[in-house]
Structures are given as C-alpha cells and as structure tokens.
Amino acid sequence: MKQALATVIANEQIARGIFILRLEEPDQARDVKPGQFVHLRCGTSFDPLLRRPLSVLRTGANQRNCLPSSQYEVLYEVVGRGTDLLSHLRPGDLLDVLGPLGRPFQIDRATRHLLLVGGGVGIVPLVALAEEAIRHDLSVTLLCGFRTSARAFPSDRLPPEVEYVVVTDDGSAGHRGVVTELVHVYLAWADQVCACGPVPMLRALAALERPRHLPFSIAMEERMGCAMGVCLGCVVPTRHGLQRVCRDGPVFGLDEIRWT
Ligand SMILES: Cc1cc2nc3c(=O)[nH]c(=O)nc-3n(C[C@H](O)[C@H](O)[C@H](O)COP(=O)(O)OP(=O)(O)OC[C@H]3O[C@@H](n4cnc5c(N)ncnc54)[C@H](O)[C@@H]3O)c2cc1C
Ligand code: FES
C-alpha cells in the first residue's frame, strides 16, 4: 500500500454519468489485485474531507489488455460531490491516491469454470478478476445486471474469451429481469462464483439454492472513512462478529455475512 500522486492519463465518459479514469502510478499498477480498491482524494481543498474508495477495473500489469504496465483504470458513477469532482479531472492532472487496499479475490487452484455475477458498477472488480482468470486459462462467464442498455458495461472492454451475459431491468439489452434470476442456470457448470453489486442483489444470492461446497465470494461496498481499519466506519455483521470492509474485506465468503 502506498500513498502517491498518480498522473491522470484519461478520464472518459463511457455512458451518461459513468467514467473510466486511467491513472499512471507504476507501483500501484504493479501491486493491485482483483477486488482491491484505491482511496482517492477527490478535491484539492478539505471539501470533501474524506477520500472516496473505488475498485480497480484493469491494470496494465496484467498483460491481458492494451494498457502500459505502469497504468491502471477505475470506473465510477457520478453520485455526489466526490465523484463529480473526479469527473472534471483532465489528462496531466495529479491525483492523491492511497492503495491498493483490502483483501483481493482468490481463485482456487482447482477452479476451471469461474462464474462472475455483477450488478451495476459492481462489475468493476469482476472485470479485473476476469482478466486474471483468462490469463490462467480458466473459462469465465460474467453475468451482469444493469438498469438499462445505456448503463451497460461495453463488451469490447472485456477479454474476448469471456462469455458476457447482460441483463437489464427494462429489457433494452440482453435478458429482461434481474441478474439473480439467471444464476441457477450456471451453477452446475461453475466450480467457483464471485460477485459484487448492491446489497439486495448479494442478499438474493445468499438465499439461492446452490451446491453446499461451491466456493462463493463477494466484494462488499460500505461507506468508508479511513480505509485503514482504524475508524470502524465500515463494519458489517459477520459470523465472526463485526468486520471491517476496508481491512477484513472487501472480499468475504457469501456465507460469512449475516444477511438478516
Ligand atoms: C470498496 C469499495 C469499492 C467501490 N468501488 C466503486 C467503483 O468501482 N465504482 C463506483 O462507481 N463506486 C464504487 N464504490 C462506491 C463509491 O465509493 C461511492 O459512490 C463514492 O464514494 C460516492 O462519493 P460521492 O462524494 O460522489 O457521493 P456522496 O455525496 O458521498 O454520496 C452520494 C450518494 O451515494 C451513496 N454512497 C456513497 N458511498 C457509498 C458506498 N460506499 N456504498 C453505497 N452507497 C454509497 C450515498 O449514500 C449517497 O446516497 C465503492 C465503494 C467501496 C466501499
Ligand atoms: S473505513 Fe475506517 S475502519 Fe474501515
């Protein structure tokens, strides 16, 4: 983990209010693992006071994409003051970034078929994980739900080997409905599942009938203060008591979390 001034290489709007920010910081690009996040100081003043956490989408260190090895990308949706400030960054600007932080996803040695399940911007750490899995010759299916086609993650930013199944609430792209309705179709095929998305989606996954020993991990999102395990602002109830999403997570076993 390092605090560094990363250089903005690009900040591209890929859909309304959704941006991909490409940063150059060689150590962070080299060290980040799928599921980890960076903590960004969005403004130059004390407003907002707190940094904002974003998962890493892709790193050039992975060699499964066209990024230079010294660069990595985050994807963010503009939802408030911090992300709005990020949307005004221009190439050449410097950004104070702490990271990489948190526990990454782990692909089991025995896994050959990896099922990824995302909801909205929850797709971000799963893209990084898909690239890593393809590099290790795994078969990867990525199911992801979005509100409409306009908010869907573009397929050309994924490795072509990934089977990408889009679900939209309004049926404007892919299957109509919610992503959790499709998961059971792939459960017999998968020997590991990883997911990230809004809490109602994760709760629905926890309630699904599934093979008892199927490894199933999730990346959680909580509002964060320090992101260093100190302030306890990000705790979630688990079977081992309260755990910090920033330090003990963001990746947890699906059944580790107490969903009630
Ligand atoms: C580990 C982690 C990884 C994340 N990765 C991504 C990512 O890859 N892309 C992305 O777009 N967002 C991601 N988020 C969420 C992102 O951090 C928030 O959207 C961002 O901090 C909002 O800052 P803001 O100042 O723009 O909005 P604020 O003004 O702080 O909040 C605006 C609205 O967003 C809600 N909100 C803020 N933070 C969160 C949160 N952590 N979880 C749920 N709702 C929140 C608030 O309740 C409020 O309604 C991640 C969060 C965590 C904890
Ligand atoms: S954000 Fe401070 S302990 Fe997690």
Image (tube, rainbow, N blue to C red):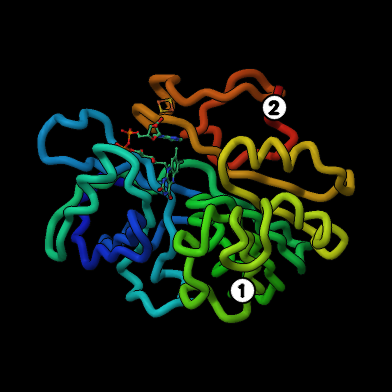
Distance CA(mark 1)–CA(mark 2): 32 Å
> Residue 187 at what x, y percent from top left?
83, 57
Q: Secondary structure at mark 1?
A: helix
Say if 228 sits above or below 79 in the image: above
Foreground residue among 80 and 160? 80
Q: Quadrant of residue 19?
A: bottom left
Q: Quadrant of the C terminus?
A: top right
Foreground residue among 210 and 136? 210
User: Which residue, given by chain and number where applicable, does mark 1 sit on?
Assistant: 134
Residue type at numbered disc 2: Trp
Q: Earlier in the sequence, mark 1 or mark 2?
A: 1
Q: Residue at x 30, y 46 (%)?
A: 2
Label ID, residue 259: 2
Q: Residue at x 60, y 53 (%)?
A: 169
Q: Secondary structure at mark 2?
A: loop
- Asked whether, in this view, residue 211 is left or right of residue 195, the answer is right
Q: Residue at x 61, y 73 (%)?
A: 134
Say if 257 sits above or below 155 in the image: above
Q: Quadrant of the N terminus?
A: top left
> Residue 91 at what x, y percent from top left?
15, 65
Tell whether circle 2 marks a residue whose Cβ is less than 8 angstroms from ligand 1.
no
Q: Are marks 1 and 2 in contact (CB under 8 Å)?
A: no
- Asked whether, in this view, residue 134 is left or right of residue 190, the answer is left
Which mark lies nearer to you, 1 or 2?
2
Ligand 1's image quarter is top left
Q: Residues within 10 Å of mark 2 (few under 14, many from 20)?
A: some
Residue type at numbered disc 1: Ile
> Residue 53 at what x, y percent from top left?
37, 41
Label ID, residue 228: none
Q: Quadrant of residue 41?
A: top left
